[in-house]
Image (spheres, coloured by chain):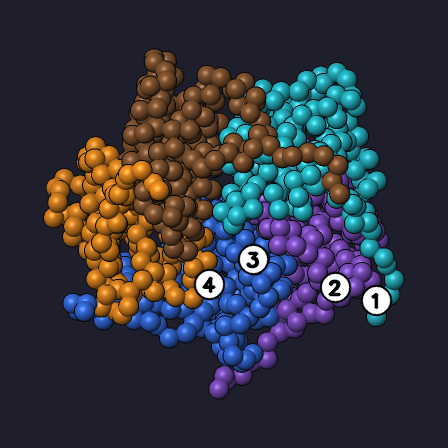
Chain colours: A orange, B blue, C brown, D purple, E cyan
Amino acid sequence: MKRIGIVDTTFARYDMAADAISEIKGSVTGIKIIRRTVPGVKDLPVACKRLLEGEDCDIAMAFGMPGKEEIDKVCAHEASQGIITAQLLTNKHILEVFVHEDEGKDEKELAWVCERRAREHAQNLLKLLFHPEKLTRDAGTGQREGFKDAGSLKKGKHS
Amino acid sequence: MKRIGIVDTTFARYDMAADAISEIKGSVTGIKIIRRTVPGVKDLPVACKRLLEGEDCDIAMAFGMPGKEEIDKVCAHEASQGIITAQLLTNKHILEVFVHEDEGKDEKELAWVCERRAREHAQNLLKLLFHPEKLTRDAGTGQREGFKDAGSLKKGKHS
Amino acid sequence: MKRIGIVDTTFARYDMAADAISEIKGSVTGIKIIRRTVPGVKDLPVACKRLLEGEDCDIAMAFGMPGKEEIDKVCAHEASQGIITAQLLTNKHILEVFVHEDEGKDEKELAWVCERRAREHAQNLLKLLFHPEKLTRDAGTGQREGFKDAGSLKKGKHS
Amino acid sequence: MKRIGIVDTTFARYDMAADAISEIKGSVTGIKIIRRTVPGVKDLPVACKRLLEGEDCDIAMAFGMPGKEEIDKVCAHEASQGIITAQLLTNKHILEVFVHEDEGKDEKELAWVCERRAREHAQNLLKLLFHPEKLTRDAGTGQREGFKDAGSLKKGKHS
Amino acid sequence: MKRIGIVDTTFARYDMAADAISEIKGSVTGIKIIRRTVPGVKDLPVACKRLLEGEDCDIAMAFGMPGKEEIDKVCAHEASQGIITAQLLTNKHILEVFVHEDEGKDEKELAWVCERRAREHAQNLLKLLFHPEKLTRDAGTGQREGFKDAGSLKKGKHS
């Protein structure tokens, strides 16, 4: 049975983990989900690594909502570097699902993108675990999680 | 008996570690606190790692007060990266408790946020150690340590 | 038989991996190519490391197309750092083949540079694997992958 | 007998290591100092690690004087990250003693701050080695190495 | 017999490695030089590490010429971080010899600084290997590789 680690924060203003868990449970059976919550995004890397190693999870998701200030951008960058290092030290994927607080024009749009991104990345996680060939089918097609897909480039002889 | 490592700096202009220790001791019994002080924030990562490994602490807190200048921001960033790496190498949490010297409009407000942040993160540490389910109960609710909580996003169909 | 790992993303808007595979297969025989696709560039480092270690690849290519926004530049930077760390932990080369979405004046030029860069780096990979002396022959000659080569500096006594 | 590693650069325009060694030797006896010099600040991390591991030093100091240009700031940042990593890999302290070339209004002031910072950090090193409780006594008191101490925050109810 | 690793790029517009090898061979005998060439600066870290470990080199030089654009500065930064990490993982020195394409006012001056920097760093390498005491003799004297030395600070009581 595959084991999925889910880590999120009390700092975030939307419960993306709940949406992701709902999406996963609505899509597959026979998996085990282990959830942890930490204060902020900088606590995510070690929390994920503990699930991947101590709880023997096969993959993890890290949810965060960095604030609008410059200092928040720096925190998000530090967290991202840590999440990449955690993956390299475990040889397992951690899908980083961050929504920056300035991505939406208002709170409603922000909540909407949170849910969409959480659910679409939950589907990415299931593909990584069970159907990696489906990701390759979409290689280079400009997929976006949350907002509208960018699509493939229009080709042709460039002028 | 759980062992908690506390590291702070002589550079900081407020003794946050004392507030955190007071908060921890006022909340639980039967824990051991080991404190170390280093010159500046860039000395925090290895000092925490030494407590987590050499002194077998279960968790640590790293207190710092970066200055207002650009160079101070860079130092804080380097320290934060190091604190994240220290966690990944030990598989233990280090709660970073930094108050930037430009976070307050005057020294009094700065001292006030130092105490609040130190005490609230001390409570976070106790939850991580003893009641992780309490953090999950607050997942996605916009908790802030020090200033006012941001709260959850107002949801609804975005226009 | 040499084994080559190829990793790309669904975020990219052009299928550079296909061009690289076509270039490799058109140039040599008796090699094994293993391809994986991940959501975005930050997922590339661990995906490459898994191919280099778990699938025993001798070398890998990491394809990505970072977007135009500041946040995309930060993601690309994080991915690049991770790709370098993955190489240091495996002692194997990973050729990073990124085309930034703002490198072309329109979609056609962007698609054109994607194909050129993918194919030229595929040739670099073959040189690294089979003919390293050919790279040394071009040392310091201002090679560029995609756009026009910069060429060697004009020497002479500087004024 | 405690062993202290000292590393500095030929790039720096002031011999801070000499001042630090003079300060250490004037303060304690029965210690062994091992000194190495490297070209620039980016060579400091591995030089320190070699002293901590190969020469079994208990602690090290890394002296550098980054230049005024943007590129120099980046070099200093890279060196600092490396010095932090070197500490995490050895579980030993390395006190980074950098004076930026734009910290003084003229060469004389710069030389003055170099000497003060070198000597004050030499005292920090001796406290870390022999009297860690003295550092804790100064925790949160706004100590500065070189220029005037910032002091503790004035407390009170913030308005 | 000491073994020296030399790595450079096809991206660079000047063959600094050739100058460094000429300088080394003109200065000492009884050493073995092993040279590798990679596409760009981000490929340097692992190439150096492979020479230090797989080819048992005692020390390495990494030559690169980052371009003028912002993206080139980021690449150089990533490469530098990787080169520092490679040193920390091998406990051996890698002298980074980068000339930024905007360091010269024209191509002739750029070529001139390339040769000077390559040769002066080759001498630094020989000192690190055979005469480390010569570097300490120059500690804090403002040495520069390429352009004119900055010299020691003028001391005196600052006003």
Q: Are marks 1 and 4 on the same chain?
A: no
Query: How far across and how far down the image is residue B135, in percent?
Result: 31, 61
**What is the quadrant of residue D110 in the picture?**
bottom right
Q: Nearer the viewer, residue B16 or A138?
A: A138
Cα separation between marks 3 and 1: 28 Å
Q: Are marks 3 and 1 on the same chain?
A: no
Q: Amino acid at mark 2?
A: Gly
Identify the residue shown where x is 45% and y is 33%.
C145
Please tell me the numbered disc located at residue B74.
3
Q: Is residue D91 left or right of residue B133?
A: right
Cα separation between marks 4 and 2: 28 Å
Numbered disc 4: what chain?
A
Please tell me the numbered disc located at residue E158.
1
Numbered disc 1: what chain?
E
Q: Are marks 4 and 3 on the same chain?
A: no
Numbered disc 2: what chain?
D
Query: How far across and how far down the image is residue A112, in percent?
Result: 21, 62
Please tell me the numbered disc located at residue D104.
2
Q: Is residue D69 left or right of residue D30?
A: left
Q: Helix, strand or loop at disc 4?
A: helix
Numbered disc 3: what chain?
B
Cα separation between marks 3 and 2: 19 Å
CB of mark 2 within 8 Å of CB of mark 1?
yes
Q: Amino acid at mark 4?
A: Ile
Please indicate, yes or no, whether residue D5 appears anywhere in the rendered image.
no
Q: Helix, strand or loop at disc 3?
A: helix
Q: Nearer the viewer, residue D93 or A136?
A: A136
Q: Amino acid at mark 1?
A: His
Identify the residue shown where x is 66% and y is 54%.
D69
